Amino acid sequence: MIKRTWYTILYIVIALFTASLGMTLYSGVDLQSALIWNVLSSLNIFYASVILPFNSETNPLVFISSILDGAVFALLTVLLASWFFSFIRSINVRGMIVLSKIKKLKKHVIVVPFSNLAQDLMDDFGEAGITPVAITDNDDTARELYKRNGLVVVGDPRDEETFYAANIAYADFVVACSEDITENALIVITAKAANKDIRVISKVKNHQEAAKISKAGAYMMVMPEATAGEDIGLKISEWLKG
């Protein structure tokens, strides 16, 4: 949507400048002088007395051309300002600061993917004095966590680079808490590929899923439905500290 607006403004700028240049040429100015004058006028730089053979205000076509150039200048200002602020937002300074903090961590726990259960786990870990790091592939979720001073890595949990960004080399555990057993299995495999010594705790719904996730390399399996649900974070915290 934003890019479409940019292109629309750019097309309008080109159309206005073309019309302005045409009027200047039609007033009897040669192409080179007309082009230079319209460019400078569009940039709000006025050297009409030097470039044009007459006062622009006395020639109605050139006068209208100067008005169009003023509109071009205004639209260019809006366009450049929009590009600039979009560039600033894309840098994601807060995200860079969070990643620098994560790189300094040791004995933290990586929780992936972020969800309501993950938030409960992170709250419990925080109360137990364990530093949690979330992984999410959703930028909006990351921004919400930033607002709460949460530590989060934005990336694909199936990509080893995401776990490297979460400083998995110095983490104690990874907690895979997806509702999908296949996703949890992929998390286990990817985390173990990034750090073969990492211990992964995975959420499962039944003993059949526990058997599957164990084959993927999980260190421990938990069933929230059988472990009082809301207390699971505290129970995992006890295991981590033990």
Image (cartoon, grey):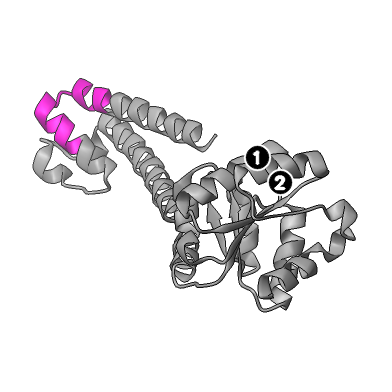
Residue linked to disc 2:
178
Whether residue 155 is visible, yes or no, is no
From the viewer's perspective, tell me whether residue 137 is left or right of residue 26: right
Region of the chain picked out in magenta, as a range: 21-37
Secondary structure found at label 2: loop
Q: Nearer the viewer, residue 46 or 63?
A: 46
Relative to 242, is 217 above or below? Answer: above
Secondary structure found at label 1: helix
Q: Amino acid at mark 1?
A: Glu
Return the disc, 1 or 2, that comes first in the chain's sequence: 2
Relative to 182, is 92 above or below? Answer: below
Whether residues under marks 1 and 2 lie with C-beta atoms below 8 angstroms apart, the answer is: yes
Q: Nearer the viewer, residue 118 or 31?
A: 118
Which percent across, then down, holds residue 23?
Answer: 27, 24
Residue 183: numbered disc? 1
**Image quadrant where one finds the N terminus:** top right
Residue 189 is drawn in which quadrant? top right
- Asked if residue 232 lies in the magenta stretch, the reply is no
Which percent across, then down, holds residue 232?
Answer: 81, 63
- Asked if residue 28 lies in the magenta stretch, the reply is yes
